[in-house]
Image: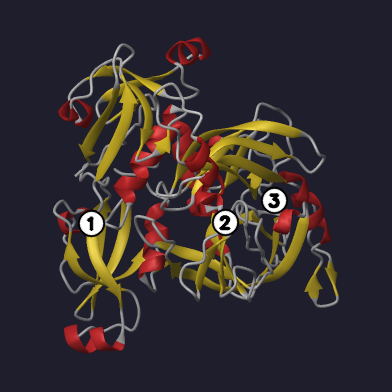
């Protein structure tokens, strides 16, 4: 859950199904046989096996969901996160006001308090990789995972992507039960699905419903961009289901339960899941490259509406009308023009922007896609070589030890003790970049960034990324720390 708490976006809005108050999305499963033996999109990055049970049985006119439910609950885990919540620095403890604070060797005490949250996750490989929501583990200092058989493991965060709300965890264990990946593109409206997770901290809970819509758009507060292409279901999900499994009737993972539409924060009839085709690509990128390889067409566009049809003289009723291009646009290079309407990608019909984003999201920079456009009533085919967000076509690799032109390293327990601090990271080397421009030198010990305590290199990346993705227009961060032989120092870094 975002900031380890469930978020309700607006009085009536989309609630993240998150950690301490998490809600997940469950849908009913399709009646068909399971023959899947791998994980579909980039599934080869993980060791995953098929369930292999026969779904040809049915109960009356409905599919028999018992085998899928029995198999999937073993692969859905309970996640406990321990972290800190920032509190208003203007608040003063009355006891401290009258009797004085304890002090901390000259260092400011962090303005935060411990919090504990809960959510769900799905084991996607036999060697311990687990997929969940980013908002479940966001700001977590400690993550523990409990399996259906009550075994508990400490989990490591491998990486996360805030835009898709997906995160990848790892536990050190082998021969774990998994759910094979299905094909979320093949889901149909009206298809039965199951939601499996831990609502209200109740483990191994299964609910059922149908797919009520696909390619549904929504936005989560603070995210850099709209998250499009959700699977919408009417399966009952509630706080604690975030990161849990959306499973079809063949027992295949087709989505990761993420949000609900609610006035109260509890289930009110609609829930949303990230399609597994998108989520699988995200976690495969994180595992292989350390960061998500986001491919872009380089267009601005809108869903076709009656007003736009009349304004631009469009000859189609659905699709995405191109209204502009980025400075370095893959679509423009391929011959696309303003007011063209994108009607298909790789042979799959495009009805709206959310669906277009979903189709492009499974690709990496440098890959080619076949795009069909309608230009003033004439259908044309274009081959577009997708670019990365920087306008190039190459894969972008992330060095987890580097940040804004600086090489970082963790502090040993002995170093922390000698400095008199309980947390922090060190700047090992400074090259050209934002750190050097701000005046930060080698040896600087970072204690906090924007008042968030930095206990690990991952914490530093997470805070910087949150600012870079912020929609509020803030481009600066305040870094607080000290040099081993000096006083406390503050540096302002402009990220623009």
Residue under label 2:
183
Taking 47 as reference, is 139 left or right?
left
Q: Tell which circle, 2 or 1, labels the residue nearer the N-terminal end.
A: 2
From this view, report whether residue 234 is shown above or below residue 439. Answer: below
Which quadrant of the figure contains the C terminus? top left
Q: Which secondary structure lies at badge 1? A: loop
Badge nearest the viewer, 3 or 2: 2
Question: In front here: 354 or 100?
Answer: 100
Question: In front here: 56 or 171?
Answer: 171
Rendered residue at 24%/32% (across/down): 491
From this view, report whether residue 51 is shown above or below residue 491. Answer: below
Q: Residues within 10 Å of mark 3 (few under 14, many from 20)?
A: some
Q: CA distance from mark 3 to mark 2?
A: 12 Å
Residue 195, image x, y percentages: 69, 61
Residue under label 3:
35
Q: Is residue 43 visible?
A: no
From this view, report whether residue 290 is shown above or below residue 358. Answer: above
Q: Tell which circle, 1 or 3, labels the residue nearer the N-terminal end.
A: 3
Q: Is residue 350 visible?
A: yes
């Amino acid at each position: 859950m975002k900031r380890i708490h469930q978020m309700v976006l607006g009085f009536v809005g989309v609630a993240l199904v998150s950690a301490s108050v998490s809600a997940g999305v469950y849908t009913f499963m399709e009646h068909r046989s399971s023959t899947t033996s791998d994980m579909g999109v980039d599934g080869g990055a993980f060791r995953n096996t098929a369930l292999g049970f026969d779904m040809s049985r049915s109960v009356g006119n409905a599919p028999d969901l018992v085998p899928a439910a029995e198999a999937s609950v073993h692969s859905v885990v309970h996640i406990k996160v321990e972290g800190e919540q920032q509190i208003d620095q203007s608040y003063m403890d009355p006891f401290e006001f009258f009797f004085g604070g304890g002090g901390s060797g000259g260092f400011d005490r962090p303005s935060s308090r411990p919090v504990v949250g809960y959510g769900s996750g799905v084991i996607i490989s036999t060697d311990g990789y687990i997929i969940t929501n980013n908002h479940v583990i966001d700001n977590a200092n400690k993550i523990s995972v409990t399996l259906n058989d009550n075994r508990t493991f400490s989990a490591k965060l491998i990486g996360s992507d805030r835009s898709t709300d997906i995160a990848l965890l790892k536990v050190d264990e082998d021969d774990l039960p998994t759910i094979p990946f299905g094909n979320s593109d093949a889901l149909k409206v009206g298809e039965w699905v199951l939601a499996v997770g831990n609502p209200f901290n109740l483990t191994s809970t299964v609910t059922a419903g149908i797919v009520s819509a696909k390619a549904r758009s929504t936005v989560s507060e603070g995210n850099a961009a709209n998250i499009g292409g959700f699977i919408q279901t009417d399966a009952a999900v509630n706080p604690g289901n975030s990161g849990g499994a959306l499973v079809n009737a063949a027992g295949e993972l087709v989505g990761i339960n993420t949000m609900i539409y609610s006035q109260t924060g509890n289930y009110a009839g609609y829930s949303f899941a990230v399609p597994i085709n998108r989520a699988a690509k995200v976690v495969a990128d994180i595992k292989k490259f350390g960061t998500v390889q986001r491919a872009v067409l380089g267009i601005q566009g809108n869903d076709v509406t009656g007003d736009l049809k009349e304004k631009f003289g469009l000859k189609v009723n659905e699709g995405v009308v191109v209204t502009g291009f980025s400075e370095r646009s893959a679509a423009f290079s391929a011959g696309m023009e303003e007011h063209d309407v994108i009607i298909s990608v790789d042979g799959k019909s495009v009805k709206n922007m959310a669906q277009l984003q979903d189709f492009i999201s499974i690709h990496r920079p440098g890959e080619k896609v076949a795009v069909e456009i309608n230009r003033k009533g004439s259908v044309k085919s274009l081959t577009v070589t997708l670019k990365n967000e920087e306008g190039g076509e190459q894969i972008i690799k992330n060095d987890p030890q580097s940040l804004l032109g600086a090489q970082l390293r963790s502090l040993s327990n002995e170093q922390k003790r000698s400095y008199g601090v309980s947390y922090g990271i060190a700047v090992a080397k400074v090259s050209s970049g934002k750190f050097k421009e701000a005046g930060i030198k080698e040896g600087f010990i970072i204690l906090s960034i924007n008042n968030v305590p930095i206990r690990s290199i991952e914490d530093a990346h997470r805070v910087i990324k949150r600012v870079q993705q912020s929609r509020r227009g803030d481009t600066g961060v305040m870094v607080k720390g000290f040099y081993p032989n000096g006083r406390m120092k503050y540096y302002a870094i402009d990220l623009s």
